[in-house]
Amino acid sequence: MAEAAIGGSAEWASYEEAGLRFEVDGEIATITLDRPDRRNAQTFATWSALARIGDTLPQQVRVVVVRGEGPSFSAGIDLRMFTPEGIPGEGSFAASARLDEATFEQQIAQAQRGFLWLRRPDVVSIAAVHGHAIGAGFQLALACDLRVLAEDAQLCMKEPALGLVPDLTGTKPLVDLVGPARAVEICLTARVVGAREAATIGLAELVVAPEDLAGAVSDLAAALLATDRGAATATKRLLQAARERTLEEQSAAERREQVARVRALFAGS
Ligand code: CAA
């Protein structure tokens, strides 16, 4: 079945061809990066498929889990992008470099769409990270609201070491979580951040033994689902906007949301 547009081209790929599995079980959706023989390397098809999942997410879903099959969460962008031949049907950086600026930016914007929806207020996204999360893999974990790491997780923002910037929406959440100085240090050294350090500096909510990762994520999902859906959405909306607002603005936003909540809960009683 045709499901996902390949970035910048008119071709279509199924989730399977894009290296993903997508499963819905009640209120929980699970996205699995499923190209373990390539360490779940990502391509424009992967990002288009992610965007399509966001566009078509079943209404009942409240928690989205993003995980990786095999030994790594994700080894980042498919390195064939750096070769002259590129990825069949998707192109190469050399080909992209010849595009006009607006077209190339549009290609990147389409890739970013695959990440941005993971922050929408009506869902909570959880990255379940084990093994390597490099470049685009690290950014995918950063795109999620919460990160549960296995003790063997290794995060690395490799892009600057390859002459690129992190452009898959990762720079803002990274700075929000660890602050600008630590973000500069992590990105410009392209060093590996281990799971324990990740928890210490705010990059992980939870670190567990690798064999406990699935269980810990499922427990967290259950706890998130135990709250009222409308309240959860409104609270996430409030929390997301808090940094950009003054205390007075945020207080006003709390009032607006609470009036709506109380009306929704008690109208007609
Ligand atoms: N793209 C394509 N293939 C990849 C890949 C990638 N990013 N990462 C690994 N693979 C392939 C390997 O080529 C290898 O294939 P073969 O079996 O055909 O030789 C297979 O996956 C297994 O890889 P390894 O033997 O290297 O596995 P490992 O477990 O020993 O090491 C790893 C895992 C540390 C992740 C290592 O594979 C690695 O360093 N990969 C490259 C990581 C990288 O530099 N990614 C780019 C990040 S930058 C980014 O993502 C840019 C951006 O967003 C713009």
Image (cartoon, helix red, strand yellow):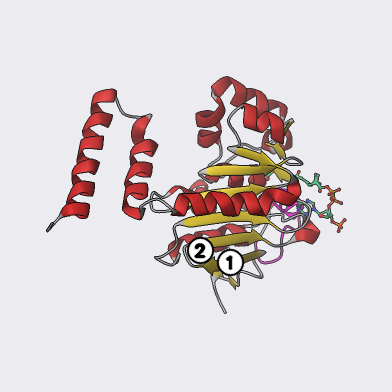
How many marks overall? Answer: 2
Mark 2 C-beta closer than 8 Å to ligand 1: no
Q: Residue at x 52, y 36 (%)?
A: 173
Q: Is residue 11 left or right of residue 157?
A: left
- The amino acid sitting under disc 2 is Ile
Is 135 located above or below residue 187 in the figure? below
The foreground one among 222 and 138 is 222
Is 69 located above or below residue 192 in the figure? below
Instruction: Give the residue pinned by disc 2.
Output: 53
Q: Quadrant of residue 207?
A: top right
Q: Which residues are magenta?
A: 75-90
Q: Residue at x 39, y 49 (%)?
A: 121
Taking the view exactly as shown, the residue that stands out farthest to the bottom is 1
Question: Which x, y percent locates residue 231?
Answer: 32, 48
In the rendered image, residue 229 lying in the magenta stretch gets the answer: no
Q: Is residue 27 visible?
A: yes
Mark 1 nearby-residue class (10 Å; few <14, some 14–19, many ≥20): some
- The amino acid sitting under disc 1 is Phe
Question: Which x, y percent locates residue 164?
Answer: 65, 38
Is 171 located above or below residue 27 in the figure? above
Q: Is residue 102 left or right of residue 205?
A: left
Q: Is residue 133 left or right of residue 12?
A: right
Is 129 located above or below residue 29 in the figure? above
Report if the CB atoms under discs 2 and 1 are less than 8 Å apart. yes
Q: Residue at x 69, y 29 (%)?
A: 197
Instruction: Give the residue pinned by disc 1.
Output: 22
Question: Which x, y percent locates residue 180?
Answer: 55, 23
Helix, strand or loop under label 2: helix
